[in-house]
Image (tube, helix red, strand yellow):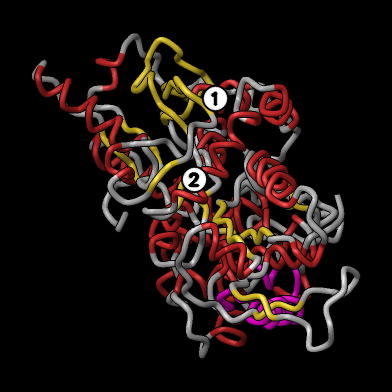
Amino acid sequence: MARLVLLLLLITSFLPMTNAATDEQHLKFDTKINVVYGDYDVMKERRIIRVLIPYSKTFYFIDNSGTQRGIMLELMQQFDKQINKGLKPSQKTHLLFVPTARDQLIPQLIAGRGDIIAANLTITPEREKLVDFSEPLAKNIHEVLVASNKAPELKSADSLSGQSLFVNPSTSYISSIEILNKNLAEKKLPPAVIIKAPGNFEQEDILEMVNANLADYTVVDRYLAILWKQIYPNLVVYENITLRDDGSIAFAMRKNSPLLKAQLDKFTATHKIGTSFGNQQVYKYLRNTKWVKNARSEKDIEKFNQVTDIFRKYGQQYNIDWLMMVAQGYQESRLDQKVRSKSGAIGVMQVLPTTGKELNVGDIRLIDPNINAGVKYIRFMCDRYFADEKMTDLNKLLFTFASYNAGPAKIARLRKEAVAQGYDPNVWFNNVERIAQLRIGNETVQYVSNIFKYYVAYQLIIEQAKSRKTETPLIAEKSE
């Protein structure tokens, strides 16, 4: 499949050529983001259907060659063939894929910034009040418990009483857990605790963290659990602990869109799960992926405890989130001062001797000066390249890590391109991150993503330790 870079643009209006249109002429698009409403007839007149789609390792992603892939992407490409069958190029309606964080899918649709939601979106009464759904792509979906193989074994849904479940708050799993908690309350049992994942975390991201023992339990659709269990060997799928067993997944559209619904219903009849095409797509995406390593093993937690005070000290000195710096240290060296790279980088923060000398922090072969150097250098980069940018503090650090990995000049170019393609140049996730994946590949994207996942994991560890009132150095005093 050829690279479809234009499909990533947040494009909303079709402009005809100034000369007489021919089948061979290229299409011109206005990249200005507009709010546009209307049913399928309006979309045909504009010749654009905007597809809101979450960036996901199963449903929509960009591979190392810059090619868009994923189950939902390929379903939508087949939908494109259906609605344009027999038409000349100058008559066709074009699908434009708009990568959108899951928690923004329905708000963006309602706001007129998209026309279809193509995601594994479960039909719920709450959602039906807001949007309309096509006929289901899949029925009788079970939402099951998935655990790390190092988490305590559970016997039944009642065993979830008092346990923490790590889920994206914009998924149907939240309402399923709320129903579970009502049942637990009737039995006078404590509720399950919902730990909310960041809005940009898809189910695969959460499964990846559970596999790496970064979180204990989550809830996910059974078919996804079975698929990713074959890739993430440390997952335990509790098929006997089901929080929902009658879920239906469908495309979503704005209310009062009968013409679009008719087209989507016709399509799902021949492409849903259970058809030859639907089943083929599901199994096509069983693919090998990289995943974060275990940052919660006893050995790694011991390392974390040993370096906590040092990171806190320099985090305070340089006014930087110390826990984020621990996450970078784990990504660089697994918090191991003995690590040496082929390039000569040393210790926890993988500092080059020349850099250490320039930073004037002492002997970086020792752990305290090494961490000092790493934190000081990130502070320097952040101040030099992003201090005056209109970014959140979190995004300033994310862009700094990206610059640390790929070089500040490259990141500056990517931010400029993000503006041209309708993305926010001051937001990393789901914005400049997407351009980075297209232009420089997965390494930097994965580097920043891993650091953020470790950061979230360490926050979870601290909160869980607080709730259990343990006496480890990890949470004794100073854990704010």
Q: Which residues are magenta?
A: 402-425
Question: Which residue lies under the disc numbered 2?
Answer: 261
* Nearer to the camera, 475 or 203: 203
In the rendered image, the vertical position of residue 207 relative to residue 449, given as above or below:
above
Q: Classify residue 131 as left or right of residue 55.
A: left
Estimate the spatial distance between the alpha carbons at disc 2 and disc 1, rounded to whole Å: 29 Å
Type of amino acid at the residue the image marks with label 1? Ala
Mark 2 Cα shell of 10 Å, populated few (<14), some (14-19), many (≥20):
many
Q: Quadrant of the C terminus?
A: bottom left
Q: What residue appears at the point 76 percent right and 63 percent down from the top-left corner?
A: 438
Q: Classify residue 421 as left or right of residue 195.
A: right
Q: Is residue 47 visible?
A: yes
Is 423 colored magenta in this rendering?
A: yes
Q: What residue appears at the point 23 percent right and 37 percent down from the top-left corner?
A: 469
In the rendered image, the vertical position of residue 354 relative to residue 164, given as above or below:
below
Q: What residue appears at the point 75 percent right and 32 percent down from the top-left corner?
A: 287
In the rendered image, the vertical position of residue 137 relative to residue 401, given as above or below:
above
Q: Position of residue 254 (x, y in %)?
A: 41, 55
Q: What residue appears at the point 80 percent right and 53 percent down from the top-left corner?
A: 67
Q: Classify residue 472 as left or right of residue 394.
A: left
Q: Position of residue 372 (x, y in %)?
A: 56, 69
Question: Which residue lies under the disc numbered 1?
Answer: 225
Task: Say which element carries label 1.
Answer: helix
In the rendered image, the vertical position of residue 182 relative to residue 134, given as above or below:
above
* Nearer to the camera, 93 or 362: 93
Q: Earlier in the sequence, mark 2 or mark 1?
A: 1
Q: Is residue 301 visible?
A: no
Mark 1 Cα shell of 10 Å, populated few (<14), some (14-19), many (≥20):
many
- Mark 2 vs 1: CB contact within 8 A: no
Type of amino acid at the residue the image marks with label 2? Lys
